Structures are given as structure tokens and as C-alpha cells.
Image (spheres, rainbow, N blue to C red):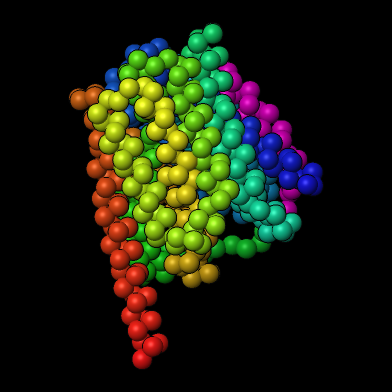
Amino acid sequence: MNRSKYVFQAFYFLMFFSFGSLFPLLSVYLKEVVGLSGTEIGMIMSISPIVMIFIQPLWGMVSDYTQKPVLILSISLIGTALFGLLYSFAHSYVPLLVIAALLAVMQSGIVPLSDSITLHYVQKANENYGSIRLWGAIGFAVAVPIAGQLAEWFQLRFIFYLFFLLLLVSSLLAWKLPKEQSNTKANIRQGIRELARIPSFLLFLFTTFLVFGPIYANNFYFGVLITDLGGTLAGVGFAFLLAAGSEAPFMKFADSIIRRYGMMNVLLIASILACLRWLLYFFEPPLSVVYATTIVQGASVGLFIPAALQYVRDLTPEHVRTTAVSLYSTVGNGLGSWFCTFVGGYIFEHFSIEHVYLFFAVLTLAGIIIFAWQARKNRCHVKMKFDTIRK
């Protein structure tokens, strides 16, 4: 293994370690330490994905204009670290909302810039993107129990200090990443027009909104569910360790599973597993059952992400695939996450955390129905082609 790959793996590990040390426990902090209401927590937690929708493309434009992606990535990392630290100094709703918005502005550049640099490297070095990105999942998985335990030993505010420190180290590692930049630029406006004329792609974006929005929003509410059922902060960390850690083996073998069962079938199965998990949480199961079912996330997320990306690539023309993947990420990770987080906060305040997961189950069920219809349509299409060939 060459030195650059080691740097990439260490970078992804520390970057996602920082995310895992803060965001899963942030809602617990806002509830137990600051004392915010469910609607206020939902508003703060939903700021990040909605800001991402508007700000994320700007980071790419700046990177393209300067042709210095590593520098821009480092700025994004340092800015995110500083605003994360500011969280520990705010104790009321409005300042926290402002800090959350500013943090989201800086953070929205981290993942797309990192992935852009990584994809350029793996194409040039003939490496495997999954073997690098896998370390992000591992970093997130081990971060939550460690941060949860440290928060119990000291105080919940400690998660902001850990977040700050790890992102600073990540920014130092970023400077060791390859500084070459691909000269390929996508015409976003023209690409969006062309993709808008592909009904299957638009339908898939809507389905991603329904299925992946709850998956991302779960990262914000799962800690509240665990503590509501009587769990500790260390228990929250243990649950996230099981959930995020189980993604790694599924990501590793996702390609062979997709080849064997087909993309649409894999997407359908992953969505069904996610729906059953949300529905189970509505019935307030024992903590031991909740911990056991977190492993389902490995299948639902670890299979859904690679299958969805491959589906988008196969569905769209080559010259607009970059735009297509960007839109897919924005709808699921941005718009879907914002909607589910915001509405979830309202439901949490007026009903309970268990009703939030019932809402997630209903949305995912709607996505399952669309996937099942598409799978049936694809099978009929293949059968018609086969019958035509036989004739």
C-alpha cells in the first residue's frame, strides 16, 4: 500500500471520528444541558441539511475557480472546528441556531471536497474508493462510544472540545493529500435540464428523499430514543458503534451482492429493513432489542449507498453523471434529512420520540412502494425484451 492511501485512510478515519463524537450526542446535549424544547432542537438540527442544499455547490465552484481543492478543504475543516467549539459557549436558543447555521456553512464543503479529491486519486492510482471510504464508517462507529464514555466521565460539553481537536488534526492531514485537481468540469445548468427530462431519475430522487431522509435524521434522534428508554450516554455510544460498525462489512461486499440480486432488489430489501427498524422503535422495545436491531443499519445503509450510486450511474448519461450524483446526494442528505429532522422535532415536542420513528416508518413505506413498482416494471421490461428476442 502506498503512502498516499495511508494518508487518505487516516484522514477519513479522523474526519468521521470528529463527526461521530459530536452529532449523535448533540441532541442529547441540547435537551439535557441547555433544556431546549423539541421544536427548538428540531430547528437547530435541521439547519445543517437545508444550508447544505444552497451552500454546498459554492464550495465546488470556489474549488474549481482556484484549482486548489486541498486549500479549500483545509479552510472548511478549520472553520467547522472553530464554530463547533463555539457551541460550548452558547446557552440559549437563538445563539445556538446562529452557530448551527454558520457551522453548517463551513461543514457543507468537507465531504464533497474530500470525495472529489479521493475520486481523482483513485482514478489516477487505480485504487478502490470503497477501501478508503470504509475508514470513515469505522471512525464514526468507534467515535460515538468513546465520546459518550468521555462525556459521562467529564461532562457533555467535552464533545465540542474533542470535535475541535480532531478536525484540526484532520486539516493537518489534508495538507498531505495529493494536490492535483481534475480539469473536468460539469455544466450544472445544462446537466440539470437534461436530467429533468428523465422521469425515472426524478422518481428515484423522490424515493431517495423518502427512504434516506429518515436514515440521516436518525443520527440526530437516536440518542434521544436511547436515553428515553432508560439508556446512558455510554449506551448511546455502544448503539452507534454497532450501527455504524455494521456498515463496513456490507460496504465491502456490496458489489458482489448487487451483482447477484440486482440493484433494484437490493434497494428494495435495504428499504424494507429500514422501515421495519423504525416501526419497531415506535413500540418502545427493550433496550437490548434496540441494541440488537442497530445491526440492521449495516444492511440498510451499507447496501443502499453503493446500490443507489450505481443505479444513478446506470440511469443517467455519462456526461451528466457528476451532476446526477450531486443531485442524489443533495436530495437525500440535504432536503430529505432537513425535512425529516424538522418535522421530527415538531412531532417529538407534541407527541413522543417513538412517534418520530412512526413518521420515519411511514415515509420509508412510501419509498418501498415506489421501489416495488419500479422493480416490477423492470422485470416486465426485461421479459418483453426477452420475448421479442425469442420471436
Q: Residue at x 55, y 14 (%)?
A: 150
Q: Residue at x 44, y 62 (%)?
A: 262
Main SS class of the magenta portion in the image = helix
View extreme (bottom): residue: 391
Question: Measured from the top left, where is residue 289 in percent x and y?
Answer: 36, 27
Q: Is residue 180 visible?
A: yes
Q: Is residue 25 above or below residue 204?
A: above
> From the viewer's perspective, is 88 left or right of 226?
right
Q: Is residue 163 magenta?
A: yes
Q: Is residue 341 above or below residue 268?
A: above
View extreme (left): residue: 350
Q: Is residue 83 above or below residue 192?
A: above
Q: Is residue 266 above or below residue 84?
A: below
Q: Is residue 62 visible?
A: no
Number of labels in the image equals 0
Magenta-highlighted residues:
158-180
Q: Residue at x 48, y 13 (%)?
A: 156
Q: Residue at x 35, y 69 (%)?
A: 378
Q: Is residue 116 magenta?
A: no
Question: Measured from the top left, where is residue 303 in percent x and y?
Answer: 47, 49
Question: Measured from the top left, where is residue 203 in percent x and y?
Answer: 32, 60
> From the viewer's perspective, is 317 left or right of 271?
right
View extreme (right): residue: 2
Query: In what quadrant of the picture does the C terminus appear?
Result: bottom left
Pick the residue in front: 95 or 216: 216
Question: Measured from the top left, where is residue 12 in percent x and y?
Answer: 63, 38
* Residue 185 found in image quarter: bottom right
> From the viewer's perspective, is 276 left or right of 192?
left
